[in-house]
Amino acid sequence: MGGRVTFGGTVTVELEDYSLVGAGKARAHDRGLVNAEWFLADVEPARMRELQVRTNRRATIDTALWIGLTFLAGWWLVATAWSWWSVPAMLCYGALYGGASDSRWHEMGHGTAFRSRRANEIIYHLASFQLFRGPTVWRWSHYRHHTDTIITGRDAEIVFQRPPSVWRTIFAFTHLQGGAELFGRLVRHAFGRIDEDAKEFVPASEWKRVIIESRAIVSVVVAAVVLSFAYGSFLPIALIGGPTIYGGWLVVFFGITQHAGLQENVLDHRYNTRTVYMNPLFRFLYSNMNYHVEHHMFPSVPYHALPDLHAEVKDQLAPAVPTTATAYRVIFSTLARQHVDPTYEIELDVPEVESRRRRIDVGESNWVQHANGGVDLAAASSMDIGELRRVDIEDRTFVLGKLGEDDFMLCDGLCTHANIHLAEGALVDGEIECPKHNGRFDCKTGEPTRRPVTQPIAVYSVTIDGGRIVGHVNRKATS
Ligand code: FES
């Protein structure tokens, strides 16, 4: 987009350029908004570790219920085709297939819903198909969304670009244009024509995978269309592929509450993201993503723990919007105002609090160098299992973690993907997980074990000496 607009008859403003390959990209760099440090609310580390715990139980129940209800609604549609009962059947089937799949896609993409990596991946791919989203393209797009949330020229997922149009927003609920664009992109990718935006954030090493995935999704949808023609029935396409379009209204219904009308180009999710209190049915369909500020601030917390996380941090955030209806009232009145004045922003009552950054600073004046060349870091008994601590030694920064009784790890502090400190992350099944995009490294070898990290991290040897943790920061753990 970009360009200029005049409003009020006299005031002319420069519009933001939302393209990832246009002038907005350079502008985001110049403003220091790319890969920047974001505000973090203060949560006691021990409490955060409780909230980060992954289990399979809750996600299994929720996923089984979602899939079971989807099959039931599909059976209802088949059994009633084509009577008036087909209308509510399609409404339910579409909402479950093409709407509720969005938050499943999202949670599985973060890898936090199930403890089992395989379960997350299976549901992620299923939901990607249901949404016409190439799994790899959208995985990387979402990494970018979390790195540079609502930063113009960087975030590929800014849905309501300014100046917004209320009528275009209402039309978005049909998902006709959105669904056609998604499928068109899949077709182009299936023919090997990867678009410039995707090339901007998907590594070239994954383009082949993008093409294969797109071909697979397009083939299944084409097969459903062929079946419909062959049998002279709309049912195949009404059951597969079609619900992505006619159920997409639910994606828009929930998605609009996340960021629409809020501030662009800020480094604090409290100003560009919205938390809305929703009823239990909505929270099930939306996998608790109504706690969206909390999710953006701490993506390592699984969806089922977000209400508890909200209770911990709500005093540090703007007040949550009390109902979905209130959120809609505020959003549409804001979009209407931004249509004539793209600079208009909602005023939020955000409390002034310090961003959380905890560390052990082992500066030159107070660190003890052991005879064996190690550095005294802390008493072994002072750490809990699963705890991570930031350790700064002179101009270097590390993460110290306790994996088990007398089992510690020490590695470089910054993630190799985007310079985020790993001390805010989590220890999960012998891996250290980055707090920004849930990338992971093996604690013993430093090898990357989960995208988006692709480069290993240095891991150092740790010994226990007289009950003290001694880090050998010049000796690699594997040497
Ligand atoms: S900064 Fe992206 S995974 Fe660490």
Image (cartoon, rainbow, N blue to C red):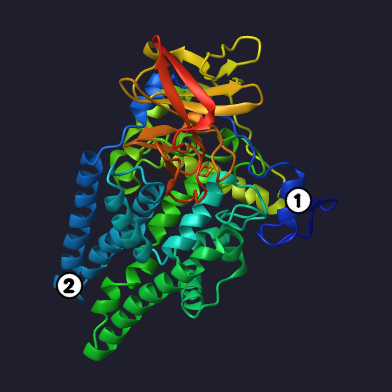
Q: Nearer the viewer, residue 358 or 26?
A: 358
Residue at point 55%, 47% (across, down)? 260
Q: Position of residue 404 (x, y in %)?
A: 31, 24
When the figure is inspected, residue 335 is found, relative to residue 58, above or below; the finding is below
Q: Nearer the viewer, residue 282 or 122?
A: 122
Which percent across, then down, holds residue 48? 40, 25
Q: Give the residue drawn at x 60%, y 21%.
A: 393
* Depth order, front residue of 306/122: 122
Looking at the rendered structure, which numbered label has been put on residue 27?
1
Q: Where does the image place residue 207, in percent across and percent down from the top left?
A: 51, 68
The answer for how far apart the CA atoms under marks 1 and 2 are is 53 Å
The quadrant where residue 134 appears: bottom left
Q: Of all residues shown, which one is farthest toward the left?
A: 79
Q: Name the one closer to the observer, 304 or 233.
A: 304
- Helix, strand, or loop for circle 1? helix
Residue at the far front: name it. 371
Q: x, y percentage for residue 471?
A: 49, 22
Mark 2, Cα crowd under 10 Å, few <14 / some 14-19 / many 20+, is some
Q: Is residue 475 left or right of residue 291?
A: right
Q: Which marked residue is nearer to the observer: mark 1 or mark 2?
A: 1
User: Where is the N terminus found, in terms of image quarters?
Assistant: bottom right
| Depicted 209 relative to depicted 412: above or below | below
Give the labeled residue for mark 2: 78
Q: Secondary structure at mark 2?
A: helix
Q: Earlier in the sequence, mark 1 or mark 2?
A: 1
